[in-house]
Amino acid sequence: MTDNGNPRHIAIIMDGNGRWAEKKSMPRFMGHKAGVKAVRNIVEHCVKEKIEVLSLFAFSSENWRRPKKEVQMLMELFIGTLQSQVDKLDNNNIKLVIIGDRSVFSAKLQNKIAEAECQTENNSGLTLVIAANYGGKRDISQAFQKIIKKINAGALKAEDISEPVIAQFLDTSELPDPDLFIRTGGEQRISNFLIWQLAYTEFYFTQALWPDFDQLLLAEAINSFKGRQRRFGRTGNQIINTSNLTIK
């Protein structure tokens, strides 16, 4: 949490693009295009509110099960968005980080991702994390694969494995855990998104479909977060007493 009470890290599942389009008798893909506009609005608000990290679930490892044509169009939209937006991100001091298994993407998309990350890697403003072909269970399993390799190489002992050690091998190793998780579209589950990192995150669910999720609705979610008492296993009185302590 920041000095002004805002969350340091907001994670969002951007749900409802397809349903938004279907409600308007439009092809589902038009909902995804409208969703990109919503992303721009939310990024702008996060910059304004001095949020440190914004993580967006763009494409899960389970989304490959969708119709082939829709997946293909999503990949093309991803490439086009990277091409058109990376300069704007860079000019606004935003650092872009892509997490997930990118090995299955086309060579063209992998190159665009690498170029965008390289161009913005030294920026010090908002860190924009895009989860693409990401799965929380895979994130944890690949972390343990890396740990086992370290053990086999003699660089780590099994008894040294701890929660902080595991966190060092996750895709988000250089980021703080999310303070606020938002899911649009009315569903109330995390759908394999950041399942390790969300252990003590505050959840906020909204019926709004992602293309309709604007800066006002984000402000409502942040205000909801500010009104909660985060105890992390302690009692409410302990939190109050700690916050009232002054250094003499």
Image: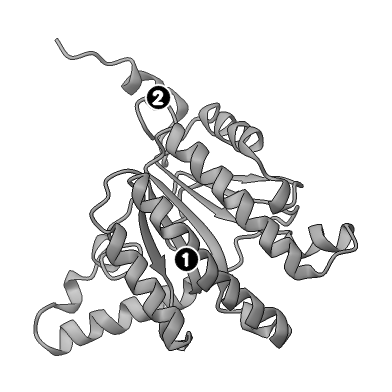
Determine the residue positioned at 32% across, 54% down.
175
Question: What's the distance in space between the residues labelled 2 and 1, CA to CA?
Answer: 32 Å
First along the sequence among labels 2 and 1: 2
Q: Quadrant of the C terminus?
A: top left
Query: Which amino acid does the dot numbered 2 rest on?
Result: Asn
Task: Say which element carries label 1.
Answer: helix
Q: Nearer the viewer, residue 114 or 242?
A: 114
Which circle marks residue 133 in the picture?
Answer: none
Crowd tier of the residue under label 1, counting other residues whose Cα lies within 10 Å: few below 14, some 14–19, many 20 or above: some
| Residue 206 on image: x %, y % | 71, 45
| Residue 104 on image: x %, y % | 47, 88
Residue 172 lies in quadrant: bottom left
Residue bearing the label numbered 1? 82
| Residue 129 on image: x %, y % | 42, 58
Q: Quadrant of the N terminus?
A: top left
Determine the residue positioned at 74% across, 54% down.
185
55 lies above or below 179: below
Residue bearing the label numbered 2? 4
